[in-house]
Each structure stands twice: as C-alpha cells, then as structure tokens.
Amino acid sequence: MNKSDFPIFTNHPELVYLDNAATSQKPSIVINAIQDFYEKSNSNVHRGIHKLAEESTILYENSRSTIAKFIGAKPEEIIFTSGTTESLNLIADMLGQYFGTSAKTKTILLTELEHHSNILPWQKIADILKWKIDYVNIDNNYSLDIQDLDYRLRTLDVSIISLTNMSNVTGSIVPLEEIGKLVKSKSPETLIVVDGAQYVPHHKIDLSQLPEIDFYAFSGHKMMGPTGIGVLYGKEELLTKLNPTKLGGGMISKVEREHSTYANLPEKFEAGTPNISGAIALASAIDYIINEITEDDINKLYNLTQYSLTTLLSIPELTVLGPQASENRGPVFSFSIKNIHPHDVAQYLDNDNIAIRAGHHCTQLLHREVFNLPATARASLYYYNEKDDIDKLIASIKKLITTFK
C-alpha cells in the first residue's frame, strides 16, 4: 500500500490523520469507481431491460458477491444499508416485529462497550415488547467480562444479545468465537447480533467459521469505502423468516389490492433505489484491501499500535483507557490528560495539523458510568499511518501539557 494512493494526503501534505475510527480516507480507486459509474454506467438496478440498466445491475450484484466472499457469506445473505447504524436499526425492528407475538417478558443483553447505535434501537424494541435491557460488564483490563456474561446467560431469559466486535473507545477486541459458543451452549435459541464497524476495517472476518453468529453489521466508510453504504449480514434461514420494515418498489413479487408478496432474498429488504455507486465503490475498497494491503502492511500497523501504546503510556499526565497489551486491542487509543479538557486537546493538536477526535464517541454510558468522565480524546490509526505520525502526536501532546501547566 502506498500513501500516495490517497489524494487527501497530496492535497494536505502536512496532515497527520488520526481520526480513522470516525472515518478512513479513500484511495483513488474508490473515488474513481464512483465517478466511473456515473459517467459510464448510470442507471437504476433490477428494473430496466436496456443495456445501461443491465450493466448497472451486474455491477451492483457483483459488488454484493465481492462483499459476501470477503466476509465468508452467501450473496443472498448480504443486505445493503446506509451503514452500521441503519443495519442495527433494521435488524432490531425486524426482530421486534418477529418477537412481537410473544407475551413472555424476556431480556435483550448488551454490553458496557456499546456505541449508541447498538443501544438505542434495542431500547426502542424493549419498550415496545415490554422486555428488559441488561448489560454485560467490562473487566479491569477494559475488556468484556466473560464470567459476567456467563452469569447473565444463566440467570436471565435472554432472547437477543447484541455486542461490538471491537470497541470504538477502548479498542478492546471481543472474542466472538468464544462468546458465540458460550451463548449457544447456555441458550441455543438466543440470537447473536454483532456490530463489526470497528473490527472489519482492521481484521479478517470469516463468518462461515463463526456459525453461532446470526447477524453482523459494518460500514463502508471506516474501511476506505464511501460514506452512506453499509452491510447487514444475516443467516439465510433467519432472513427468510423475517419481514421487511421498509416497503415499496424493488422488494415485491406481486402486489394485489388487499395483499402483496415479497421478493426473494436479499431484494425483499432493499426497498427503493439503493446506493448503487456506494455499493460498487465499497467493492472497490475491498478489492484494494485484498490486492494492496500486504502482510507487511498488517505487521506495520500492529507494530505501530504497539509503539503508540508504549509511547502514550510513557506520559505521566496521560491515562489510556483500554487494554495495556497490543495483542488484545485494535489501533484505537482513547485517553485523558490530567486537568486538560479533551476538546482543548483536540483543538491544540489541530493547530499542529494533527486530526484526532474528542468527545464521548457516542458512548455516554461507558464514559459516564464506567470511566466517570464526560469525554476523552481519541487517536486511531489506519494502514497509511507512519511512525512519524505518532512521533508528531506525542511531541504535540507533551508541548500541550507544558503549555497548560
């Protein structure tokens, strides 16, 4: 992978971009894929029989196949959405409708690591169904407490567990295989939903090797794809049982006066005109990952994660909120600096052309109830980052601390 593949760094040569957990930068191949579609193939999909319509449909469905192969799924198990947020809302609404006939009070199990997008949709469904919400704790190493999960599975009637694959705050990686086996051994009927927004950009996921996982969501824009496109994976046998929550053109088989029948998977969940160019560009991003991200790039990012963690931990005034070993985490570092507000940290670093994030990162419960903090600063890495970026970050933080003394 070459940093020169990313036009933003040519246009902003002084930029140190460390806000990748929010969104990644895009290589030219992705940007060009969007332009090429509109200049050469623009037409709606699944509707026309003219050449452009057929070409657009082929490109769109080939993209679905590329994405399915990338995560170890079947094309009919891939639903295009606008991103992880819509994916989680979609599966929550569909499961809420599916379980709506059950009069028994059950539990939706979440974790303290969750992004708001993996809390609010379930709160809505729990309120509608009159179910309960409960949370698995994190342990002293900022990771999911497996013993606490085991306890809640034994003592609660859990119908759904929805959890992140990797925290956008602590960088903690959740052991899906272990958790999947634990959940299904305690409660085979419990459905497992996973938020993979932070995990998929950095790690290979093969859902064919994780049969316990029922649904998996991720976004394109965090893995070098465009904004406004994402994926909801669902097991074919489960998606077949669920009804769509969005209705309209493109997802029907036959419409009658009083009743309609839906199209087959996955079209029945994709009402209206989809983000065609976004899907095509996401497939281009995946092609880039497959063809351009080498083993050396992967090792470099791992070593950079280790270097970042070591250097941040060496600053006495700074506290890193995440696992203290690089093998247990992804390249996301949320931190607080004694007596300095995170917004001041981000503003100061921005003056040095260093882009980081400051705030609660859509995890108010984690910050308020676990960390007892209103906000943190967050630096997050991607494959195009270099050791020099981290050195500049550390130098700017040390200068900031001296300035605020």
Image (cartoon, rainbow, N blue to C red):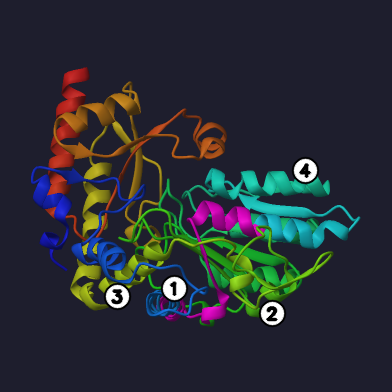
The label shown at residue 237 is 2
Residue at mark 4: 127
Element assignment for label 2: helix
Q: Earlier in the sequence, mark 2 or mark 4?
A: 4
| Separation (CA) of disc 2 from disc 3 | 28 Å
Give the residues in magenta: 64-91
Instruction: Tell me if residue 389 can be seen.
Output: yes
Quote the CA–CA distance across marks 2 and 1. Answer: 21 Å
Q: Earlier in the sequence, mark 3 or mark 4?
A: 4
Q: Does the magenta stretch include residue 346?
A: no
Q: Quadrant of the C terminus?
A: top left
What amino acid is found at the position of numbered circle 2 in the picture? Glu
As shown in the figure, which amino acid type bears the numbered disc 1?
A: Ile
Between marks 1 and 4 in the image, the one whose residue lies nearer the viewer: 4
Q: Residue furthest right?
A: 103
Disc ID at residue 287:
3
Q: Name the residue under label 1.
A: 205
User: Considering the numbered disc 4 on the image, is that residue within a helix, a strand or a loop?
Assistant: helix
Question: Which of 320 and 15 lies nearest the eye of the viewer?
Answer: 15
Quick check: can you spot residue 213? Answer: no
